[in-house]
Amino acid sequence: MNRDFLRPLLIIGLAAILVGIVALALPAWENDVFTIRKMRWFQALLPEAAIEDSLVVALPVAEHAPSALDPFWQRLGRMPALSGKEPLAKARFPQSKRRIRIAYFSDSTIEGDLITAPLRDGLQSVYGGAGVGMMPITSIVSGFRQTIRHSFSRNWESISFMSPARQDVSLGITGYTFIPRPYYTAQRTVEEADTIAVADTSAVPEAPKSRSQRVYINEDPWVEYRAVNIAGGAASFESIRLFYANASDSSRVIVSYDSQAPKRFDLRSGSGIQGLDISPAQGVKTLRLEFDRHDPIHVYGVSFDAERGVYVDNFPIRGYSGMYFSRIHADVLSDFNRYLDYDLVILQYGENVSNQANTDYTNYKNAMIRTVEHIQKAMPKVPILIVSAHDRSIRDAGGYRTSPDIPILVQAQAELAQATDSAFFNLYEAMGGYNSMIKWVSEQPPMASTDYTHFNRRGADRVAGMLLNFLREPE
């Protein structure tokens, strides 16, 4: 071999080995400027199955950690249970608490009120309650959710964690901010007149030609909610509050209850989150709100509850990782907590950062620690429960199997909970651990969808039952 060729090749090989050694020693580091990820060059040369087997054997099972729920149990113990019902927490006297409220943040796992609806129903069956809690103004899964009927106009600007623009706008407690806009565009089919004269009047006329035309729909943006009398829902709306900000002295909302004449409510200007009580004199089945299309106020959502009982707010953001929670500004979180008086915050994330090639979730753990600390600072004394990622399967030549990074991710979440004094529920282990998603999909009837990632309603009901049992105070 030509030495002129061999020498540079040798230098390149030695350089690659040197860089690999440095990569092994270089720690992961994350800050607000840039992130250094842990590089694992040599490990990538190992067979994937060997990495998987070593992880399954070597990783300890992350234990459930309920002790941080003590403040929640103390509050729950001051709630009187319904007659004949066994309370979930030891009775504390005086039993003076009238309402318990839980904020449940997650990704598409809880879309459509999955998990939260059966959890809400289980708690309300013991302590009472009539309402689904906080609702956003618009939703991409409004047709899928069964516990409330939800419709809205299209001229709303929707800003969320997944919106790359408008970083200056704080999100609301739902993870969204909604702003009225003057119009929206729609496609309309129009007929074109035939301008060619037909000499033979006996001929059969052709069908009129048509084309699609874009039109502007100018109307005041609106949202409508209808009560649904099913488990986790409510037969009627009793206590209703609207939350907004950035209103002017001329801001208003038009409220319609059932078939009654609309009523105008003037909105308060000023800084901070504003809550407007728009409760009817008696329960109603339909609520419709209309806003001025030229008034760019920030609307956050509507709360449906009652004077007593337990409420679980469903806050899903599709594709969201749980990181960068500071987009809900601390003062906004604090204001919502002042209005809604939360007793527990549940965070269930992880599936959207899961990557079968990843063997180090230190950066994710550190980012999630900042999320929890942000919530703790804004909502002091409100306990937090971390629900781990659930099992997720990938497919290879041998069929389906647990994505090898899932146990590592779950362990990082357990460490996150410990570092922030949060409670921890290991959903991965609770559903059966390694390859359990395959069993959930193959059960008859199935408990999960064939994407081997998402629970269906039956599976979500089972997960809710596990959580309900976890929220029961130990003897």
Image (cartoon, rainbow, N blue to C red):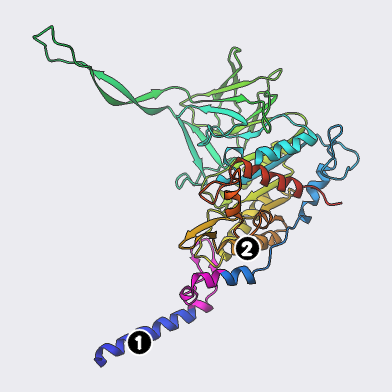
Q: Is residue 245 visible to us here? A: no
> Helix, strand or loop at disc 1?
helix
Q: In this view, does 315 lie to the left or right of 85?
A: left
Q: Which residue lies furthest to the right in this view?
A: 93
Q: Residue at x 73, y 48 (%)?
A: 382
Look at the image and say whether residue 380 sits in the magenta stretch.
no
Three-letter amino acid code at the position of disc 2:
Ala
Residue 279, percent from left and from top? 68, 23
Residue 116, percent from left and from top? 66, 40
* Residue 302 location, quadrant: top right
Look at the image and say whether residue 36 sits in the magenta stretch.
yes
Residue matched to label 1: 11
Neighbours of disc 1 within 10 Å: few (<14), some (14-19), many (20+):
few
Residue matched to label 2: 412
Q: In this view, does 89 lie to the left or right of 461?
A: right
Distance from disc 2 to disc 1, alpha carbons, whole Å, reads 39 Å
Work out whether 28 lies above or below 131. Answer: below
Q: Mark 2 or mark 1: name the one nearer the start of the chain.
A: 1
Work out whether 403 lies above or below 200. Answer: below
Q: Residue at x 65, y 23 (%)?
A: 278
Residue 277, percent from left and from top? 67, 26
| Residue bounds of the magenta highlight | 23-52
Q: Nearer the viewer, residue 76 or 211?
A: 211
* Residue 445 location, quadrant: top right
Work out whether 201 lies above or below 433. Answer: above
Q: Which of 334 and 225 is in front in this view?
A: 225
Q: Which of 13 and 455 is in front in this view?
A: 455
Neighbours of disc 2 within 10 Å: few (<14), some (14-19), many (20+):
many
Q: Is residue 3 visible to us here? A: yes
Residue 223, percent from left and from top? 54, 26
Image quarter (top left, top right, bottom left or bottom right) of the N terminus: bottom left
